[in-house]
Structures are given as C-alpha cells and as structure tokens.
Image (cartoon, rainbow, N blue to C red):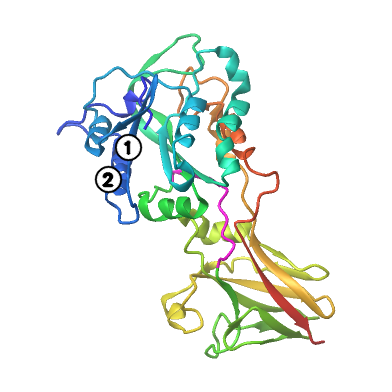
Amino acid sequence: MEYSGGMKGFVPTATAATQPTEFQQRVGNLLTETYSSPAVDKARFYLLLKDTVREPVKFQDLLRVVKGQQNRAALGTELPDILASILGRPGASQEVSVLISDFVYGADNKANSSQLQNLIKVALVPVRRQRLAVAVLGEVSRFEGTFHPAVTTPVTKRVLKRGKLPYYIWVVGPPAAVARYVRTVLPAPAPSVQQAFFGLSFPALPAAAVLTGLPAGSPLAPSGNASISFAGATASRMLDVEDARQGGEFTVALNLSQLPAAWQQPAFLGHNLRVQLPGGTASLVPGSARELTADEKNAAALAPYTHRVRVRLDQLPPGRSTLTLSLPAPGVPAWVSQWSTENDNLPGPVPHTYRLNEILAGLRATFPAEPEPVFATTFTLANQD
C-alpha cells in the first residue's frame, strides 16, 4: 500500500464512535482475505514510502495503518517508481502483486507530467516481456484530511471534511493467477466499483455445442428450419447441418468459471461475444447469454459448464467450415475518461484523478495493438445441403 500525505485522509483514526471510511472497510477486508485465504500460498506486505520504496511490514502493522493508528511521516513515491519497484522484485513474474494507491501523479520534476504515458509504459516493460496481466479497480471513499492535488494552483493542498475521493487497486501477475485472485480472494466489489482488465487470456476454456440428449421442449435444443445433428453423443465440436437456408439455432455451453465475475455477467457477454463464420453468416442470438440453471447443470451433458449462448446460422459456406465464438480483449473502458481530469485542484462530486486516461493509456500500450482474445473456441460445420 502506498502511504503518502495524500493517502492519509482515507485512513482517519478509527474509534468506537466513528464509522470507518469505505477505504478502511474495503482495504481492511482485502488485507485480511489475502492473509488468510487458502488460495494464497504466502503473503508479504509492504508500505511504500519515499526513499524506502519496498519496506516490508507485518500484516498486523499494515492493518494498523489502515485503521489510522499510524502517525509517522508519509512522503509519497512517484507512480512510475512505485510500479517499477513492484515489478522489479525477485520472482515478481511468478507472483500476484497488489498495489493500493490514489494514483495521483505529483512529479517533483513538473516537466515529467508531459511524459506520463511514456513513463508508465517504461515502468511496465516487465508486464510485456513476461506476459503478465493487470486488473484495475477504481473505487471511491470518504476522505477526512489533507488532499494534495497534482495541479498545485491556486492552492498546494486542501483540507477536506467528509469529502469523496477515488483510489485504485491494481492486481499484476500471471494471467490465470490474477483472474483467480480477483475472483476468489479479493472481496466482491460493490456495483459502483469500476473495473478494467488487460492481458487475461484462457486458451483452453471448455466449450461445446449441446444438441442431443435433451428433454423435449428444452430451451437448449436446436430451433428453426435447419436440421442440426452431432458427430458425438451429447456435446461436440463437430456439427452436421442440413438446409440452413431458412436459418437455425443451436446452443453453445461454456465454462467461464476462470473469468473475473464482471466478465461472467450476461449483459457483458451479450455485448462483447463475437461469432465469425468466413464465407457464411452466423450471429449471437440477442439476449441468449445467461448462466445455466441448477436443473440444467444437473444434466450429464452440461455438468462441466456454467453458461450458455445461442448461435444462429443463416448462411453456410459449401462443404466444411469453421465457426469461431470468441471474447475479444476489451480495450480501455469508458469510465477511465470519465474519471480523468487535467486539473484536480478542486475535487468535485464526480470522481476525478489527474490524467488517469494517460496512466491507463500507458498500461494499454504495454500490450500488443491487437491483443489475444480472452478466449476463442471453434466448431467445425459440415454443410450437408
């Protein structure tokens, strides 16, 4: 956790007569879950201070800081240095690192502000080289204390009473480990928490067409005028299709349990999943993405899966063809621009962080211009018409 003058307002001294800030509740839970979770083999905690970028502390001592029971001087470390320090630790490429900070970039050398995106990109070079993933969560908390803005005019600091300021949790590490930490260790975020994910990829995500072995009238069964049958028993990647001129639909079952919870939501899947059929026409049926019901999961064919979507076939190329269902890697989400500001000197009702868009642009530039999809699964279609 970064501990600077600007962070101290998130952690006022907790007493029996006061309510903890959202930061104290959330970060206190995060530290406790990280310390106690069976999913974590070993947890180490650091307080990030000026000129002591990597100061290890005991779990109980860091928890005392979060409770406001810390009066030591707190001088901030510049953001690129924080990121470079975390990623420069021995073994960082095999571990999950979690950074908690307000991400306010108040550079000692003001000329560096014009190079913020490049500085972030350079600090994150190990992310690219070691093919790591990054999760970013943006949250808002009550703030009681002195706010130190990056833009120091007309004032260099402001005292806030019951103000609201944003802070961020970054999770960095191997893709599967980052996804697991966010999914099983990090306390479930509130609906208001903003999220962004970069570098997550699951090349072996289980998926299959589900056609036969279903009860009459099942909503998973094929529909339309096309006759769709299997090269298998109850789930397959080989489909024989006859007479698709009038169109037909079939169900694809997916196991999305490895994905972050935000990416398992039907609305997200319906908006972001893509269907490709070179030489033909296929699409995702609107509103068809959903979690499997308990009864559906009890069916032998569906036991390994968590979600289902419907794919519609309108035109098939001749002979055999390949249909691909994929989740492309999302880019920088819209909330980042909404939370970004060129002047943070006067905090307002809307969460604002100085040049947050450049910070996330530097993060996004760490990955390829066309990143690998989160997952892609293919089906062979044999046109029997």
- Residue closer to the observer: 253 or 225: 253
Q: Which mark is residue 165?
A: none
Left or right of 125 on screen, residue 381: right
Q: Residue 309: tell me if it is visible.
A: yes
User: Percent x, y for residue 99?
Assistant: 42, 36
Q: Amino acid at mark 1?
A: Phe
Distance between mark 2 and mark 1 Cα atoms = 11 Å
Q: In the rendered view of the protein, which quadrant contains the N terminus? A: top left
Q: In the rendered view of the protein, which quadrant contains the C terminus? A: bottom right
Q: Residue at x 38, y 51 (%)?
A: 188
Magenta segment main secondary structure: loop
Q: Residue at x 49, y 54 (%)?
A: 262
Left or right of 335 on screen, residue 373: right
Is 249 located above or below residue 173 in the figure? Answer: below
Residue at numbered disc 2: 32
Looking at the rendering, the stretch of residues picked out in magenta corresponds to: 192-205
- Residue closer to the observer: 6 or 373: 373
- Please tell me which of labels 2 and 1 falls first in the chain: 2
Q: Residue furthest left?
A: 16
> Which picture quadrant has residue 322?
bottom right
Q: Which mark is residue 45?
A: 1
**Mark 1, residues whose alpha carbon is within 10 Å: few (<14), some, or many (≥20)?**
many
- Residue closer to the observer: 86 or 119: 86
**Mark 2, residues whose alpha carbon is within 10 Å: few (<14), some, or many (≥20)?**
some
User: Percent x, y for residue 248?
Assistant: 71, 80
